[in-house]
Amino acid sequence: MPRASGGLKASTRFRSFYKLPEKLCRHSDGNFLYYAVVCNIHYLGWAEGRVRLYEYEAKEILKARGINVPIGLLIPGHEQSTPIDSLVPAVAKVQTQRGRRQKLGGVVAVDSVTSALEIVQKMLGREIGGEQVHHVLLEQRIPFEEEYFLGVTYDSLARRPVAVFSDRGGVDIEEAAAFQPDRVHRLVINPCKKFRNYHACDWLCGLGFSGKRLRSLTDIVNRVVSMFFEYDAFLLEINPLARMADDNFVALDCHIDIDEDALSRAPLKHVENLSNRAEGTRRLTEFERRAREIDELDYRGVAGRVVECPGNLGLLIGGGGASLTIFDAVRDCGGRPANYCEIGGNPTVRKVKELTKLLVSQPNVEKLAVIMNVVSNTRADLVARGVIMGIREAGKDPCETIVVFRLPGSGEDECRKLLNYYGIPFSGRELPIDDAAALAVARCNKPVGNAEVSHGHFD
């Protein structure tokens, strides 16, 4: 595992941020991203730009594509055509975009109409994982023989879609991958070639399936992969996929995450208020909304993915996935970030300027730290120009506002000259990320200027 600049292990930061066990984050080949893909672990960068469908919406898609789902009733719904007494014994499930509903009391078995109505009434309006419940799905309880996990997502390491299958359905796939990795199987998919039945059949044959089970599962895998591409999905997951006594299969639960940028062409006319969900279950603050508008000023680069925090140190961070590492390092040093923010992809000077101006104009922001990993496709001098222009337009002195400017890589020499002109010390590879974060926190409440040590070294 390569180490992030500054001695920070990416796997350690990744694990500490999500409270994950060590063995979950490291595969035998030393690659923690293996489990990030196999276990469908979404960290902040992956969650950006995706829209999750509710379970009942995802099941409508499965049903329309010929995959069996339980008979159910959405409460409240437009049409109450299915009588409740025909469903019991049933399962009442809150409709939220959060996972692990059962552990939070969002999935309850009911055995009578009376208990079903009582449970549904209790569920409606309550909060599950910070999200208010507006709908409950009441589904017929189906007896089954076995539970499987089937999903398709993206493998950032292979840079291709990957199908994931496990005979340990109904539980967290993370747990299965951590403690029984031999029971989690992957199939890397070539997006340039049509996925055909024989691809799924060969894969499932290798897992020991035969006869009717093989035919049924092959058909389901093929349909799921086709839907994954048709809907421009980040994730399509059926868990559990239940096997009945007659060797037919039923999708008892389903999650679909769709690329926000593909909503206009996705066949989702039956889904209401879909565009509003791009913001997630948490409403954007006015600060975050303005940052998003800045990012939409120009298609080039990213400069506007911001999460507001109640701190006093503004952060302009990014570079090869290092933004979370830097944010963590600032907090570990006792700093109070005023925001999480990432930039990259060589954003224009205007976008960086407007974002910087927005960051330092916040009444709680006292200083600004610009810390990035080694950049290649982002010009350091263009970022520096945008930062300085933004601070000046906000009516502040760049030399007094910037506590650390660490941005090694492309355009580094031009960046150094520009910063020196304004009396701002430039830091390159010689200053590890850990030390840059510590220096930013230490300087946050102290005057910054030419009298302080240049080149990013400690006093």
Image: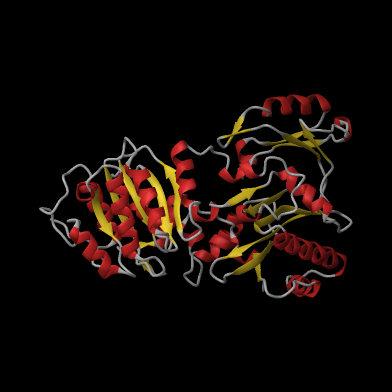
Q: Is residue 158 left or right of residue 267?
A: left
Name the quadrant containing residue 95.
top right
Please name the residue shown 72% across and 34% down the image. 136
Query: Where residue 202 appears, x then y in whole percent?
Result: 76, 75
Q: Is residue 425 left or right of residue 327?
A: left
Q: Is residue 228 left or right of residue 32?
A: right
Asked if one can make out residue 360 in the rendered structure from this viewpoint, the answer is yes
Name the quadrant containing residue 410.
bottom left
Name the quadrant containing residue 232.
bottom right
Above or below, 93 against 435 in this view is above
Q: How is the image coloured?
A: secondary structure
Q: Is residue 337 left or right of residue 220?
A: left
Query: Where residue 403 appears, x then y in whole percent?
Result: 23, 50
Q: Please state which of residues 149 and 338 is positioned toward the viewer in this rendering.
A: 338
User: If the image is split into quadrants, where does the C terminus sit?
Assistant: bottom left
Give the total of numbered labels.
0
Query: Where residue 329 appears, x then y in whole percent?
Result: 33, 52
Asked if one can make out residue 456 in the rendered structure from this viewpoint, the answer is no
Please name the residue shown 13% across and 53% down the image. 452
Query: Where residue 269 appears, x then y in whole percent?
Result: 76, 47
Please name the residue shown 49% across and 55% down the image. 45
Above or below, 22 against 215 in this view is above
Q: Please state which of residues 214 and 75 is positioned toward the viewer in this rendering.
A: 75
Q: Please state which of residues 47 and 369 is positioned toward the viewer in this rendering.
A: 369
